[in-house]
Image (cartoon, grey):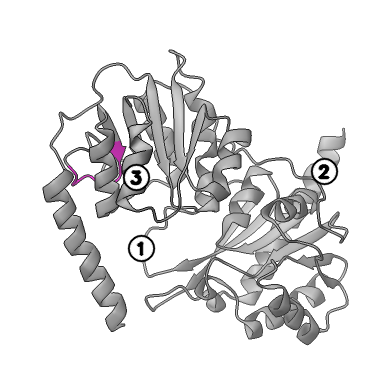
């Protein structure tokens, strides 16, 4: 607790110092012609990348043959280059030093618009904007002077994908296709048959965003009994495989299997691609399922009445459930098993009704 407070205090002091050293008040509203757009995505967050994926496709539809550059981490570079189709991908480590930022910027030609949709810029973000010295900056941090396209108040209460749509409208887009771009994945390392099963992903980016062992065992037993005619497959990664194996062993459910050979994100995408439906905690798997238009039960932490801007868009194929998290951290274990069963049943009912219509 003390360490967390000190880190927060340090970041606040650095931010104030960064504003004093690097910030500059700019005229409000988009200035001049926008020919070169640079998007900062150096946070290495996969799910957020999929949420923003349509933005890059729709940018290329705008008149004027705009150049689109992205700054991202090496792990995500191929996604932006090969799947999202941006013109140039600049790779930099997740936590670069000031020297690395300066060297990177020295090789970037003039930028007309920087898009950095973060809500609280840190000193290195401010230094990056200072070095780029672009004509325009769009951000969710309205308090920064260089940010002349202020989106926080303007997009308050919008889901994050809708914030991107709003920005596209400011750039002149009339109609926006918000379908996510998900790369087509081959079977790769996967050795399990994923067809016609309901995929369960109990693991989030942290232990707080994951189901506990006890919760997952309880849920698996309930699902296996309530949906005895269906097959379930539990998704894991090399880091969570042993935990998933222990969960399955404890549940002793005959219609639940552990998906074998899932070693990369492409392997995980393949499993989602092949399955009939997805049940997942809040993580990139949710957004992959949305992009692949898979029936989805997504479980998110709920902190009181705080609006969660990272939820998927509500559609007939999506059910969103919440796990009340009264503390500072998320707690995924308070979601009601009965609510999960009801959401999955209604989703399967809609899906099965739609299949005969699609075949006609």
| Residue labelled with disc 1 | 306
Q: Is residue 297 left or right of residue 36?
A: right
- Mark 2 and mark 1 lie on one chain; the one further toward the N terminus is 1
Image quadrant of residue 69?
top left
Instruction: Tell which of 103 and 133 is nearer to you.
Output: 103
Measured Cα–Cα span from mark 2 to mark 1: 37 Å
Which percent across, then down, holds residue 42?
Answer: 43, 48
Secondary structure of the residue carrying tag 1 is loop
Residue 358 in sight in this render: yes
Measured Cα–Cα span from mark 3 to mark 1: 35 Å
Q: Would you say the magenta stretch is mainly helix, strand or loop? A: loop
- Residue 92 within the segment the image draws in magenta: no
Q: Is residue 199 left or right of residue 208?
A: right
Q: Are marks 3 and 2 in contact (CB under 8 Å)?
A: no
The residue carrying pointer 1 sits among few (fewer than 14), some (14 to 19) or many (20 or more) residues within 10 Å by Cα, namely few
| Residue labelled with disc 2 | 355
Which percent across, then down, holds residue 9?
Answer: 21, 70
**Marks 3, 1: nearer the viewer:** 3
Q: Give the residue drawn at x 74%, y 54%.
A: 267
Q: Which residues are magenta?
A: 138-144
Secondary structure of the residue carrying tag 2 is helix
Instruction: Tell which of 96 and 246 is nearer to you.
Output: 96
- Residue 143 within the segment the image draws in magenta: yes
Measured Cα–Cα span from mark 3 to mark 2: 52 Å
Q: Give the residue drawn at x 71%, y 65%.
A: 200
């Amino acid at each position: 607790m003390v360490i967390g407070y000190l880190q927060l205090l340090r970041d606040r002091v650095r931010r104030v110092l960064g504003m004093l050293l690097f910030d500059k008040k700019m005229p409000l509203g988009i200035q001049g012609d926008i020919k070169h757009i640079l998007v900062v995505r150096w946070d290495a967050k996969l799910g957020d990348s999929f949420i923003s994926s349509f933005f890059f496709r729709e940018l290329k539809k705008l008149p004027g043959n705009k150049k689109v550059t992205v700054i991202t981490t090496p792990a995500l570079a191929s996604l932006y280059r090969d799947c999202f189709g941006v013109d140039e991908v600049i790779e930099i480590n997740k936590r670069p030093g000031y020297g690395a930022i300066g060297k990177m910027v020295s090789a970037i030609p003039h930028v007309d618009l920087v898009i950095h949709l973060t809500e609280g810029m840190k000193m290195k973000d401010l230094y990056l904007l200072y070095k780029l010295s672009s004509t325009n900056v769009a951000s969710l941090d309205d308090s920064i002077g260089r940010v002349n396209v202020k989106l926080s108040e303007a997009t308050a209460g919008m889901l994050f994908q809708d914030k991107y749509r709003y920005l596209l409208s400011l750039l002149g887009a009339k109609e926006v296709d918000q379908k996510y771009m998900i790369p087509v994945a081959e079977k790769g390392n996967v050795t399990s048959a994923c067809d016609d099963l309901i995929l369960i992903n109990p693991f989030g980016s942290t232990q707080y965003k994951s189901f506990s062992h006890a919760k997952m065992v309880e849920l698996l037993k309930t699902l296996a009994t309530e949906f005895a005619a269906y097959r379930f497959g539990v998704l894991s990664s090399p880091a969570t495989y042993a935990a998933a194996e222990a969960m399955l062993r404890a549940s002793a459910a005959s219609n639940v299997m552990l998906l074998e050979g899932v070693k990369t994100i492409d392997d995980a995408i393949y499993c989602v691609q092949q399955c009939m439906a997805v049940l997942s905690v809040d993580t990139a798997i949710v957004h992959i399922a949305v992009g692949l238009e898979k029936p989805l039960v997504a479980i998110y932490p709920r902190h009181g009445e705080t609006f969660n801007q990272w939820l998927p868009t509500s559609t007939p194929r999506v059910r969103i459930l919440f796990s009340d998290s009264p503390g500072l951290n998320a707690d995924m274990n308070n979601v009601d098993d009965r609510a999960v069963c009801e959401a999955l049943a209604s989703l399967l009912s809609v899906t099965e009704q739609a299949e005969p219509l699609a075949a006609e």
